[in-house]
Amino acid sequence: MNRLMRSSTLTWAFGYVLLGIAALAAFAVPLWYAWNVTIFAGREEILRDDAQRLADVFAHDGVAGLTAHISQRVGMQIAGERTLLLTDATYRPLAGNLAAWPQGIPASSGVHAVMADLAGQSTHTLLVQTVLPGGYHLLVGRDLSRFLPLERRFTWGLFAAVSFLFVVGVGGAILLRRKMLARVQGIRRTVSAIMQGDLRQRLPTVRSGDEFDTLAQTLNGMLDHIEYLIAGISNVSNSIAHDLRTPLAELRSRLEELATTRPPPGETFTEIDAAVADVDRVMRIFSALLRLAEIDSGARRSGFVPVDAAAVAAEVVEFYEPAAEQKGVLFSFHSEGVAAVAGDPVLLAQAVSNLIDNSLKSVPAAGAISVRVARRADAVEIAVADNGPGIAAADRPKATERFFRGDASRGSPGVGLGLSIVDAVAKLHGGVLQLLDNHPGLLAQMVLPVTAARSNR
């Protein structure tokens, strides 16, 4: 019972019931007040007119004429239609259908609502008193209880409306609560299964498009992303173990050989330099992974500032020009002017550096690399194209996976994290990394939606 009373559905239902009752009251109270004021004022006006006509009879025919007139009216009218009484100065009845002067009525003229004895029954009556010349008193009245049946019907109708609203509101709330509890129980079962490790479970939907379906679809999207991240963590762990095994094994082998053979100093220092290179390779892997983790967390988004992507790309191109010249690579840069985005200039520079570095590693001597920054209608495009071996079409969907290395890059230096970092930077800025065929070679371009980037500030 306590759980039932704590139900939010019943709380809302009672709230709506009270709101409905308040609305009925706001309608009924003014109507009731208007009814009473209108009926009372109308009765009073009619009685005053009637009293004035009788006063005119008195002025014209005297007390005898008025007495005869009242007696005639009492005999002809419907029982209880009018209350009439004419008395002398001592309140002795002369004519009318009241046996005696009602108690509680003062001697002066006016309007009074009293209980009067009419035909042996005590009746709530509205009376208009007129003092006539000579001290005569005239009462003209009407039974106020004649409209009581109508007023009772109004009251019962209002009570029935409130009762219907209450029953329907509570009954509907109970049915709605059962339906909501059924949906909630389904969500609870799914969440319990997920908490126990079954990440393949998804929240049930009924395709009704209601709030529960919207919530379930949003949470299912979140669960899909969590499952993807966990799978990625598992793959990264396996890749780390695989990629670190070789340099660590080489490092151990060199150190073990040095400890065993005790070679001359020159050969020893050569092996030490090779061991340092292996350690540097391991450190580069961990540095890249830490940078990826930082990008994936979205922490860098809080530091977004207005950035000219063309200026960032130009600085990176200038940095790599000596390396390209040393390899004999034709290196070109083209920009269509200022390409303003909201982003992290350091990450954008690193992404462009990774793309150029990959191209420099893959293009042959006397090859060509071009960097282009263009402004579209609602996006900025940063493209790096080369005429190297490129990436096979079958490998492009996997090229941004961490530690992935295609057949063309097996012999080149690197750990397979360059394109992963570029892809993460593009996603952080609300964009996408596209890998296309350059015929020959690879065309890698980051497309950063300007609107999406600005919304992240």
Image (cartoon, rainbow, N blue to C red):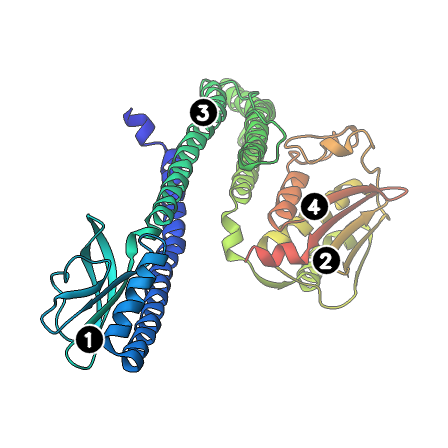
What crowding class fits label 4: few (fewer than 14 Cα within 10 Å), some (14-19), or many (20 or more)? some
- Select label 3 or label 1 by which is in front: 1
On the image, the x and y values in percent for residue 231 come to 58, 25
Report the quarter where the C terminus lies. bottom right
On the image, the x and y values in percent for residue 394 come to 81, 29
Helix, strand, or loop for circle 3?
helix
> Which label belongs to residue 178?
3
Residue 58, quarter of picture? bottom left
Marks 1/2: CA distance? 95 Å
The earlier-in-sequence mark between 1 and 2 is 1
Q: Name the residue under label 1.
A: 109
The kind of residue on which mark 3 rests is Arg
Marks 4/1: CA distance? 95 Å
Residue pictured at 86% horizontal, 47% vertical: 367
- Select label 1 or label 2 by which is in front: 1
The earlier-in-sequence mark between 4 and 1 is 1
> Which label belongs to residue 432?
4
Residue 2 placement, left or right of 310:
left
Whether residue 35 is situated above or below residue 362 in the rendered picture: below
Residue 158 placement, left or right of 352:
left
> Which label belongs to residue 269?
none
Between 45 and 80, which is closer to the camera in this rendering? 80
On the image, the x and y values in percent for residue 44 come to 31, 68
For the residues labelled 3 and 2, say whether their Cβ atoms are less than 8 Å apart: no
The kind of residue on which mark 4 rests is Val
Q: Name the residue under label 2.
A: 380
Between 367 and 94, which is closer to the camera in this rendering? 94
